[in-house]
Each structure stands twice: as C-alpha cells, then as structure tokens.
Image (tube, helix red, strand yellow):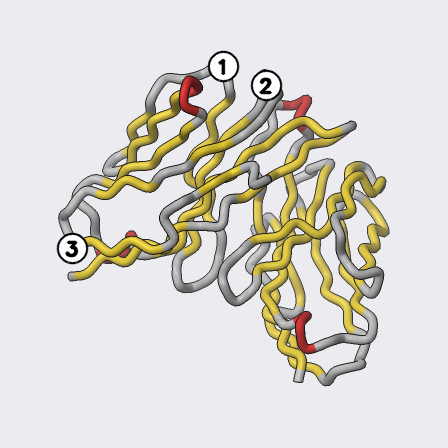
Amino acid sequence: DTAVSQTPKYLVTQMGNDKSIKCEQNLGHDTMYWYKQDSKKFLKIMFSYNNKELIINETVPNRFSPKSPDKAHLNLHINSLELGDSAVYFCASSQPFTQGALEQFFGPGTRLTVL
Amino acid sequence: AQKVTQAQTEISVVEKEDVTLDCVYETRDTTYYLFWYKQPPSGELVFLIRRNSFDEQNEISGRYSWNFQKSTSSFNFTITASQVVDSAVYFCALSEEFRTGNQFYFGTGTSLTVIP
C-alpha cells in the first residue's frame, strides 16, 4: 500500500496556465506538507496543514494555494504558472509533535516543468 | 539564519572508504528531533534515522552510524566501507514544536558520490 501518493508524477505546461497537484496519505497522520525542491536540491517548505488548519505559510507567492478537503488530502493549486515554478514538488505527512514527531513520510514527487 | 547547516556540499570517496557527513543544528527548544534522509538519483526521499533531544546515545545500523552531540549541536552521519549504492544526496533535518503541530527544517544536503 502506498503511504503518500501524488499525482501526476510529471507535469509539463505553458506559462500562464493554472494547474493542480494532488496528494493523498493513508497513514492517518494529522499533518501534511508541501515542499519545493529546486534544481540545486534545496528543499523548501511551502505549506503545512494540521487537522485541516493551515499552521505554516512560508513566503510563497499567493499564486500557490493549498486545499485540504479532508485530513487525508492536501492538494496544491498553482495559478498563472511562471518559469521559476519549475521544480520537483513533494508532499509529505507526519504525526504531530505531541505524539513524538515521527519522521515525515514523503510522496514520490511531482516534476513540474513550465515552458 | 540557517537552522540546519550541512557545510559539505559535495563529497567524493572511493568505494570501501569511510565517510562522515556533518550536520550542525540550531534551536532554543529543549525538546526537538533530528533526522537524516537519503535521496538517491531516482529522486525519492528515504527516511534513515530519528533522534530525540534527550537521547544522545550513538546508533549503529549496519554500515551506518550516527553521532549525536548536544554540546556541539551536531548530528553527524558516518558510512563505513562505502558502496556505490550509497551515492545520493543526504539531508539532515530538525523538527521543533510549532503551535499545534511541528515544523521541519532541512539542511541544504550533501551530495555523496562513491567511485567504484
């Protein structure tokens, strides 16, 4: 069983388009995250959701918006895509700190290419 | 300021050599967690180890070992008798409590190349 899944795995699109990346976890975790990994492999946290509440929102352009229909899903919507948005986006989930800050489980990543 | 520093950007070793990857962290919390992740060329992020701030006991798992020293705020990772399959980017991470959840901070990664 896949713990954290993301779709699509690859996404190629034109500048200015709007796209979404879906993420689902079947681990029963309370917290989910989105990370962006650039070409230099630097992992930057974008958002995290705890029990459907946004608790962290780093300095990410408001073209990016997370949507969590339920505890098991955290989708990433991107409007008006720009060349600089090209990266690999990882979804992750974890238990909350109060339960021992277990490791984050990562999805396989979505490679976004903006042309 | 960087919460997790991995000063070694790239390391190359010859197969069977030992290699240590350095990680220095910064936190004011008394309770925190440290992690190492591996990212092989295939791209997935693989969890290797978790340590809480109250457990400074070193750990060994096969060819892997970890040295946690609170006095120097370091959590170093050593691979003994390296193999080509160890070639990957390795990330050190810190988790702190944040409101009702937790925040993770990743280092910039160390790219390890093991030459056959």
| Chain letter of the residue beneath label 3 in the structure image | B
Asked whether the residues under the numbered discs 1 and 2 touch, taking CB atoms below 8 Å apart as contact, a structural biologist would say yes
Label 2: element kind: loop
Disc number at residue B14?
A: 3
Q: Is residue B91 left or right of B33 when viewed as pictured?
A: left
Pointer 1 chain:
B
Q: Which residue occupies 77% across, 28% down? A: B99
Residue A18: name its quadrant.
bottom right
- Residue lying at 67% horizontally and 48% vertically, measured from the top left: A25
Q: Earlier in the sequence, mark 1 or mark 3?
A: 3
Which residue: 29% across, 32% down? B65
Q: Which residue is mark 1?
A: B54
Crowd rating for badge 1 (residues with CA inside 10 Å; few <14, some 14–19, many 20+) = few
Tell me the quarter of the picture where residue A48 sits: top right
Q: Nearer the viewer, residue A103 or B115?
A: B115
At label 1, the amino acid type is Phe
Q: Please, is residue A55 above or below residue A40 in the view?
A: above
In the visual, does B79 lie left or right of A26? left
Q: Is residue A90 left or right of residue B23?
A: right
Question: How far across and down, in percent of the image, does residue B76 sit?
Answer: 35, 33
Mark earlier in primary sequence (3, 2): 3
- How crowded is the residue under tag 2: few (<14 C-alpha within 10 Å), some, or many (20+)? some
Between marks 1 and 2, how big is the CA–CA gap?
Answer: 7 Å
Residue B24 lies, in percent from the top left, at: 44, 34
Is the residue at mark 1 from the same chain as the one at mark 3?
A: yes
Q: Position of residue A93 (x, y in %)?
A: 65, 43
Q: CA distance from mark 3 to mark 2?
A: 38 Å
The residue that disc 2 covers is B31
